Every structure is written in C-alpha cells, then in structure tokens.
Amino acid sequence: MIDSKIKKQKQQAKELALVAANIARDRNGSDIVAMDLMGKSPATDFFVIATGTSGRQLRTIADEITVEAKKMGLPLFGQAGYDEARWILLDFVTVVVHLFDQEYREFYDLEMLWGDGEKLELEDEESKQ
C-alpha cells in the first residue's frame, strides 16, 4: 500500500515536471531541461530549468505552471525571485522549477552542477499536433 502510494507520488512529480517544461516551451522559453534527480538530491526529485527573455515572460510562465500544478493537486510550497524575475524559483517539493534570464542561467549553470541527473525526454512541438 505505502509502496504504491510512493510510486504514484513519483509519477505525479514526473508528470508535473513535464507539464512545467511544456508550459515553458509553449510560452517561448528556451533551453528547457527537465531532470530526474531521484536518488541524487536529498531536496527534490525533479528540476525543470528554462530561460526567458523578459521578466514579464518569466512571470507568465511561473503563473501558468503554478495554476496547472494546483489543478494536479500539487500546490506551491515556496517561491522566490518573482518580483525581480531574473531567477524565479518555484518549489513544489518533489519538483523545483528554475526560470532564468540569460545572464543568470549562464552564471549559475545548474545543469553542470546537477550533471549526473538524467534528462527527461520532452515532447516536441510536432508531436503535439
């Protein structure tokens, strides 16, 4: 019973990571990466990382991800950087979303820091149509 509940939570977290990545893509984010960190990070199971071109775009992506996560039953646990919108962090506990402007993305280089995380395959635009 407990094992199936944990398995369901992990699947739901993966689904949210992919939903977040797709929202970022649909709102013209770039360099989108979803990483499976299960067993590698004590803090979360998945990272989603994306780059935007403006604060307005990054806040729009953040808002849409938050709405979709809530619909999935995964409310936002914490948020940082929303007002400045250079690096917006959305913490859903099992999924952490990082939305960067180009300068901050290059400076913090989270993909290198978590390079041992497995990248999830993202749905491309053509397969959605």
Image (tube, rainbow, N blue to C red):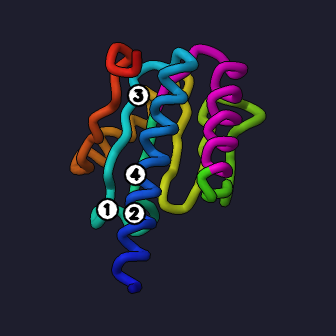
Mark 1 belongs to which amino acid? Met
Q: Is residue 76 left or right of residue 111?
A: right
Mark 2 belongs to which amino acid? Lys
Residue tagged 4 = 14
Secondary structure at badge 2 equals: helix
Q: Is residue 102 visible?
A: no
Residue tagged 2 = 10
Asked if the magenta segment contains residue 64, the reply would be yes
Residue tagged 3 = 32
**66 is higher (above) or lower (below) than 95:** above
Q: Residue 90, image x and y in percent?
A: 61, 47
Residue 7 falls in image quadrant: bottom left
Secondary structure at badge 4 equals: helix
Q: Marks 1/2: CA distance?
A: 9 Å
Q: Residue at x 49, y 38 (%)?
A: 19
Residue tagged 1 = 38
Quarter of the rendering occupied by the N terminus: bottom left
Q: Residue 11, image x and y in percent?
A: 39, 58
Q: Marks 3/4: CA distance?
A: 15 Å
Q: Is residue 109 left or right of residue 102?
A: left
Whether label 1 touches label 3, CB < 8 Å: no
Tag shown at residue 55: none
Asked if the magenta segment contains residue 66, the reply would be yes
- Residues shaded magenta: 50-71
Give the dominant element type of the magenta stretch: helix, strand or loop. Answer: helix
Residue 67 falls in image quadrant: top right
Secondary structure at badge 3 equals: strand
Quarter of the rendering occupied by the C terminus: top left
**80 is higher (above) or lower (below) than 54:** below
- Which mark sits nearer the N-terminus, 1 or 2? 2
